[in-house]
Amino acid sequence: MLELILEMTEKQHDIITRFPPSPTGKLHIGNARTALFNYLFAKHNGGKIILRFEDTDRARSKKEYEENILDALSWLGLDMEFPEIYRQSERTEIYRKHLEHLLEKNAAYISNEKNERGEEGSVIRFRNPNTKITFTDLIRGEITFDTKELGDFVIARSIDNVIYHFAVVVDDFEMGLTHIIRGEDHISNTPRQILIQQAIGAPRPVYAHLPLILAKDRSKLSKRNGAVATTDYREQGYLPQAILNYLALLGWNPGTEQEIFTLSQLIEQFDINKIQKGGAVFDIEKLKWINKEHIKHLPPDTFLAMVEQYIPETIRNEVALQGKLHKLLPVIQEKTEILCDVKQQFDAGEYSYFFDDLPPYTIDKLLWKDEREPIKAAEKLSKVFEILSEISEKNFSEIFIKEKIWDFATNAGRGAVLWPMRYALSQREKSPDPFILSAILGKEGTLARLKKAIGALENHKTV
RNA sequence: GGCCCUAUCGUCUAAUGGUUAGGACAGCGCCCUCUCACGGCACAAAUCGGGGUUCGACUCCCCGUAGGGUCACCA
């Protein structure tokens, strides 16, 4: 018996939050953050979060946007309680019930008037008691409004067609919402919603109004000043966990110096009391850094799966090249900030030396800046060739090669040895170091290139 | 304009009456080094202004100022 009572009281205190997008556009990155904070708060407290499509504007709501929002949400890994997805367009009966009740109570009335196009019609207006409303915001403290200035606001176009404010209040009540976490832009909507709440006899949930995400010029983040659709970030090669990580840090921090978080760490450490009051500028540079950090921590296979689409088909599909690609992967992973970089790197031919045969050498480029004698460079490369020849295929690894070459290079002048070696292998002024290159190219490939470079140096006509 | 919210380095932020105002991103410089990247180490950089309260204010109060939000039969 006692247990039952305990369970019931506990049930009462179970936290329920919600994410209520209106399907009139793709999932805005700012809304993604609102979803995240609702999610984190609910999960941290063992509560649940409800997804509710606010599609009372029938003209502007589109199925495709609903799909985009769902798509973006599942990409982010924010699994709402999917069995509980609501659409306001499917809840007309419920709203009607409450509307009729208000009409009966004379808390609302039908008003005959012209609409904005000058047509005769009628709407349902709320009978405003003109009181002062004070509510406590979890983030901002007490906020007071005089509702007089609201007038008798419209709550429905007709008995079967309610307006946002009314639908929201009814839904939040019917769905048992305990906490309403939403953008700061809703602060001024709160008093009128509380008025409706009082009229239908609903308890008041706890409010928390999040600071807004701002563009670089501190204006509202919009299409003009950057990508706003969450799925745009996916297309640009951001990791969902990086987006989540960055979004969480925009307006919140755990009070420690940790900056890189997994979703479960965020859930664990989330504390709504540590949310900032002021708006936060969306800084793409920091997002990129966070993305890079998350990429670094990816297992190589996961990374490969993610960037596969950005790697030229010829390399991806040819079995002979796949082994090379696999060895090259860590090099790519280390320098990738966003996934699309990989495509750009391949397009720029940054790795072409690795998969294609090299064109004839330009002697000048093979020479180290302090060692301009082709014949001397040839001698050094010959020595390198000799050393590498003695390494078995099996031992042809970066570490082993470096160990074998290092002393010679140090004695003979590292630049004078390593630069020609590296250039001989890559034909690029910028590349990974020659030991990595050798390991990737394999013994045969490495020796062939060295030999070719030595030949070029020995037979040079012009320097 | 009315109402409401906000205000620490360029940006995200820490410090909830007592700190040389801390960290991160970006920037700059140096080191590592054959180049690039990685990494390491320095430097530069802030409490919007004015009044209070207090022995003492980034911190509390008031007034300015600035920015933002909102004022629909959109959500």
Image (cartoon, helix red, strand yellow):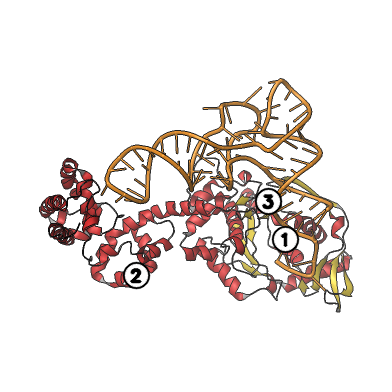
The reply, left or right, for residue A218 in relation to residue A119 is: left
Left or right? Give the position of B32 relative to A439: right
- Give the label on residue A208, or none: 3
Nearer-N-terminus badge (2/3): 3
Q: Residue at x 31, y 69 (%)?
A: A316
> What amino acid is labelled 3 in the image?
Ala
The disc numbered 3 marks a residue on which chain? A
State the image quarter where residue A67 is shown: bottom right
Percent of width and height locating residue A114: 87, 75
Please tell me which of labels 1 and 3 falls first in the chain: 1
Kindly state the secondary structure of the residue where label 2 is placed: loop
Which residue is outermost to the bottom? A119
Q: Image point 76% across, 68% down: which residue?
A: A163
Disc 2: which residue? A312
Q: Marks 1 and 3: same chain?
A: yes
> Which chain does the residue under circle 1 lie in?
A
Question: Which residue is more in the foreground, A167 or A326?
Answer: A326
User: Which disc, if any, is residue A173?
Assistant: 1
On the same chain, marks 1 and 2? The answer is: yes
Q: Residues within 10 Å of mark 3 (few under 14, many from 20)?
A: many
Q: Quadrant of the C terminus of chain A?
A: bottom left
Examine the rendered structure and indicate whether residue B31 appears above or below residue A194. Answer: above
Amino acid type of disc 2?
A: Pro
Q: Residue A394's quadrant in the figure?
A: bottom left
Q: Left or right of A361: which side holds A152?
A: right
**Image quadrant in which you'd find residue A162:** bottom right
Residue in the image at 78% along x and 72% along y: A96
- Residue A203: in sight, yes or no? no
| Marks 1 and 3, how far apart at CA | 17 Å
